[in-house]
């Protein structure tokens, strides 16, 4: 007998029939003699709709009320799934984040889980009951509902698996595993049998939305075995696990892309000590994350400084620079039509030439690289957004990742 957390995403619970399908999957797991807890997302499209309502009501709305509103999608699916399970003869009960509770910090809209009180759920699972837990929701220190950031139900599921001491956390979604790159953009993408926590963390944080980044951090920290699989087929999924469980590390295991970045260039700033600090200090103080940075060679004592920030932060970043930069500059330019492509693989640690292959493949397609950044297991480049698909396909082929 095993204890399993099963998580179903928005498409998997997209309508009443799909929820009935989920109930059959949960029942099958119970029939195998396992203890099961379920975490669910809102029906696909519902959270977007709720977010839009907030913006329509007031562009600069209160974050606490935002959470009150956007957390409701998950409440509906917990109740519906509990009913569907009961109809199949499975004892089931819905649980909202505040009822368990899932305790978080006070960062409304992107709260972090501090603790999940799992005792009551365990007691009930041991008696054969299936808890159906609302993903995405928590309870803040001010006793108000919080939400965990978009895609946060993955994190609920992994945190629940850690709190319940589960043997496995199965993430059911609309693709049957983690692929070498987004299979909806590159049809030749290959499904991976296994991927390391580290690589999955990079893939997620560099844009692969299949798992929320924090869910992977959480799985890594607590050693939760996560499996990604499809709720629409019985194909084997992808296991996220430790490096020593994988026999041979590919040089590059995956390619991710993110359209969430925007580029800012400061033209003609003085090339002198303290310049970087005077630009990036005020941005950091304003809680704006700067990702990639490049400084050009100086000509006549002045230089161009280019960096990227999240698209959502662009206007704020421009204002901070304009209002607070103490050093002279000639002009400030920005560009939202960019995409960041990243190749990821733990094999890079011990092999040279990964970046070279990337640059050559992009050059052959006539694609200009605007900014580059690297770490031990990834190389990222910023290119024009129009080239996203062309570049992804070219890189996929260049690293020999295409399915046979
Ligand atoms: P859910 O609603 O189940 O949480 P998501 O839409 O959040 O589903 O995540 C699944 C989607 O992630 C897939 O439909 C796919 O387009 C996208 N995706 C991006 N990169 C990858 C990848 N490397 N492997 C698999 N899916 C990916
Ligand atoms: N429903 C939330 C969202 O759309 C959480 C999730 O689906 O993981 O972001
Ligand atoms: Mg998701």
Image (cartoon, helix red, strand yellow):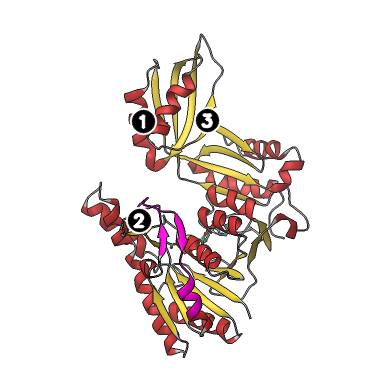
Which is in the foreground here, disc 3 or disc 2? 2
- Asked if residue 118 is among those painted magenta in the image, a careful observer would answer yes
Dot 3 or dot 2: first in sequence order is 2
Q: Is residue 59 above or below residue 289?
A: below
Position of residue 54 in the picture relative to residue 346 (left or right): left
Q: Secondary structure at mark 1?
A: helix
Q: Position of residue 220 (x, y in %)?
A: 60, 56
Q: Are marks 3 and 1 in contact (CB under 8 Å)?
A: no
Query: Can you identify the residue that label 3 sits on?
Result: 293
Above or below for 255 versus 160:
above
Q: Position of residue 323 (x, y in %)?
A: 32, 25
What number is the disc on residue 318?
1
Question: In terms of secondary structure, where does tag 3 sit?
Answer: strand
Give the position of the C terminus as an image quadrant: bottom right
- Identify residue for label 2: 141
Among the two numbered marks 3 and 1 on one chain, the one whose residue lies closer to the N terminus: 3
Choose the circle earlier in sequence order: 2 or 1.
2
Work out how far the residue at label 3 is from the one at label 2, CA to CA, in angstroms.
37 Å
Res. 369 visible in picture: no
Q: Nearer the viewer, mark 2 or mark 1?
A: 2
- Picture coordinates of residue 94, whole percent (x, y): 39, 77
């Amino acid at each position: 007998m095993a204890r399993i957390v099963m998580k179903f995403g928005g498409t998997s619970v997209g309508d009443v029939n799909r929820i009935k399908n989920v109930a059959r999957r949960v029942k099958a797991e119970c029939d195998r003699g396992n203890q099961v807890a379920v975490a669910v997302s809102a029906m696909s499209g519902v959270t977007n709709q709720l977010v839009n309502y907030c913006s329509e009501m007031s562009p600069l709305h209160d974050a606490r009320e935002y959470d009150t509103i956007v957390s409701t999608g998950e409440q509906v699916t917990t109740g519906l799934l509990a009913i569907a399970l009961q109809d199949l003869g499975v004892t089931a009960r819905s649980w909202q984040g505040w009822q368990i509770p899932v305790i978080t910090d006070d960062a409304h809209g992107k709260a972090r889980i501090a603790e999940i009180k799992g005792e009551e759920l365990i007691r009930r699972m041991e008696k054969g009951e299936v808890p159906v837990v609302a993903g995405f929701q928590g309870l803040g220190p001010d006793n108000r509902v919080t939400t965990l950031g978009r895609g946060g139900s993955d994190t609920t599921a992994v945190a629940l698996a850690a709190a319940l001491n589960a043997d496995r956390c199965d993430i059911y979604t609309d693709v049957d595993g983690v692929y070498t790159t987004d299979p909806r953009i590159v049809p030749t993408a290959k499904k991976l049998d296994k991927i390391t926590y580290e690589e999955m963390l990079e893939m997620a944080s560099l844009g692969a939305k299949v798992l929320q980044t924090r869910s992977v951090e959480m799985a890594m920290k607590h050693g939760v075995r996560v499996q990604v699989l499809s709720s629409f087929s019985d194909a084997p999924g992808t296991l996220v696990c430790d490096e020593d469980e994988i026999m041979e590390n590919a040089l590059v295991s995956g390619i991710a892309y993110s359209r969430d970045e925007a580029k800012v260039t400061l033209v003609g700033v003085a090339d002198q000590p303290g310049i970087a600090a005077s630009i990036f200090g005020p941005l950091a103080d304003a809680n704006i994350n700067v990702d990639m940075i490049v400084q050009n060679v100086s000509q006549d004592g002045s230089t161009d400084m280019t960096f990227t920030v999240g698209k959502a932060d662009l206007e704020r970043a421009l204002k901070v620079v304009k209002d607070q930069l103490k050093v002279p500059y000639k002009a400030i330019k920005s560009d939202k039509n960019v995409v960041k492509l990243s190749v990821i693989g733990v094999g890079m640690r011990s092999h040279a030439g990964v970046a070279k292959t990337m640059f050559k493949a992009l050059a052959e397609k006539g694609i200009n690289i605007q900014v580059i950044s690297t770490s031990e297991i990834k190389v990222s480049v910023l290119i024009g957004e129009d080239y996203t698909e062309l570049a992804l396909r070219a890189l996929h082929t260049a690293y020999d990742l295409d399915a046979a």
